[in-house]
Amino acid sequence: MSKLSDRINNLAESQTLAMAKKSRELQAKGKDIISLSIGEPDFNTPDFIKEAAKKAIDNNITRYTPVPGILDVRKAISEKFKRDNGLNYTPEQIVVSTGAKQSIANVILSMVNPGEEVIVPIPYWVSYIETIKLAEGIPVTIPTSVESNFKITPEQLKKAITPKTKMMVFSTPCNPSGSVYTKDELKALADVIIQHPDLYVISDEIYEYINFIGKHESLAQFDFIYDRVITVNGVSKGYAMTGWRIGYIGAPKWIADACEKMQGQFTSGTCSIAQMAAMEGIKADPSVTFEMRDAFKKRRDLVLGLLKEIPGMKTNIPDGAFYIFPDISYYFGKSYGNYKINNSNDLSMYLLEEGNVALVSGDAFGDNNCIRFSYATSEDKLIESVKRVKEALAKLK
């Protein structure tokens, strides 16, 4: 008999974190690994945000915080939603959590019953499926491809909905594809959603500020489905604050109340100092994020140009985030030495061991034909890593 619960035995390890861990282990053994596996900006947190944290410590803002977040922080988030997204969420509709991952888990665990279905477009962020399974929900995936720019159509959404459907979870800009839904595309999905009164949507917008095509569009902007959308965001990507662990939701009050209840039993209120630091970023003009965004766009163009020189690698042009998700199925069935490539996981392990580059297999995101490159690192490292990938792939016959 297993001494661990079925719950934990059935839970898959995050493959992005697993690959990052494997990279660190190989680096510790002296291997020159370039890791493009984890979604973390390589910029430092802006100084004005760090100063706010120091000030919070000096002012002894070091005690327990209210479970849904410090009121002034929630007021700042409420203003940010109005300013940037045209969304009206009162502070009572906002819950601040220890990262957007906890925000998403709070919502899913608060709303999904055993046997209820949750629609997840492919490719998806690795933790969506496992969190749905933790809630004993049934993930229902919708396939996309590099040719469709990794976006679902209203017709696909319509077909996926059944009487058991409770929720849909998706991201824009998307991790891992970098795809960004336009206002018209979101409106077309909203027109389907409104026809199903019991369908709720988690709109994960954590990459909002890393958008290369102009204004970010939020699903909740359409008044007719506003009360059925939970908007998830945070500061980790746009403000280079991954280690500060601050995410938040804007939601109908009854859902926010449920998430507060859930969080109250798991972690209570998130770190006081991190909240005060995040508030400074949230209150600042979004232009403070433009320098990082522009650097990511430059890197995207650099990597896309280099990947085009590799035979058989199909790419779209991602409009946001800091990932490229090429189709690498051309290499399936090929081999080199003891390596036989049958799927994206085989290829990612081959590139790690033979090319000394850590990437994440598309299988982790639901699309076995692809592999994820994170370009959140220096241009020199990106040039070197694609060179290594190209050389390793050239050996496969």
Image (tube, grey):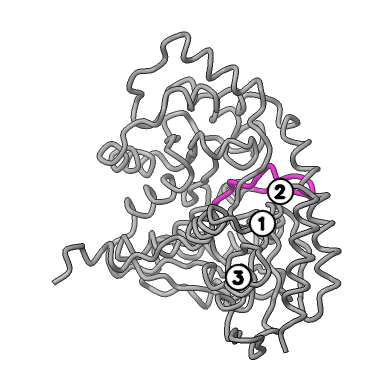
Neighbour tally class for label 2: few under 14, some 14-19, many 20 plus, Cα within 10 Å? some
Alpha carbon distance from label 2 to label 3: 20 Å
Disc on the earlier residue, 2 or 3: 3
Given the image, on which type of amino acid does mark 2 rest?
Thr
According to the picture, the residue beneath numbered tag 1 turns out to be 34
Residue 213 covered by magenta stretch: yes
Alpha carbon distance from label 1 to label 3: 11 Å
Q: Note whether residue 348 is visible.
A: yes
| Left or right, 209 with reference to 169 | right
According to the picture, the residue beneath numbered tag 2 turns out to be 377
Residue 353's tag is 3
Residue 8 vs residue 108, the one in the foreground? 8
Q: Residue at x 52, y 46 (%)?
A: 231
Q: Residue at x 68, y 58 (%)?
A: 323
Callout 1–callout 2 Cβ contact below 8 Å: yes
Q: Residue at x 71, y 62 (%)?
A: 324
Q: Secondary structure at mark 1?
A: strand
Q: Where is residue 7 drawn, in percent x and y?
A: 26, 63
Q: Toward which corner of the image does residue 82 lie, by quadrant?
A: top right
Q: What segment carries the magenta color?
A: 204-217
Q: Residue at x 81, y 63 (%)?
A: 304
Residue 310 vs residue 149, the one in the foreground? 310
> What secondary structure is the stretch in magenta mostly built from?
loop
Residue 23's tag is none
Alpha carbon distance from label 1 to label 2: 10 Å
Q: Toward which corner of the image does residue 314 lie, by quadrant?
A: bottom right
Disc on the earlier residue, 1 or 2: 1
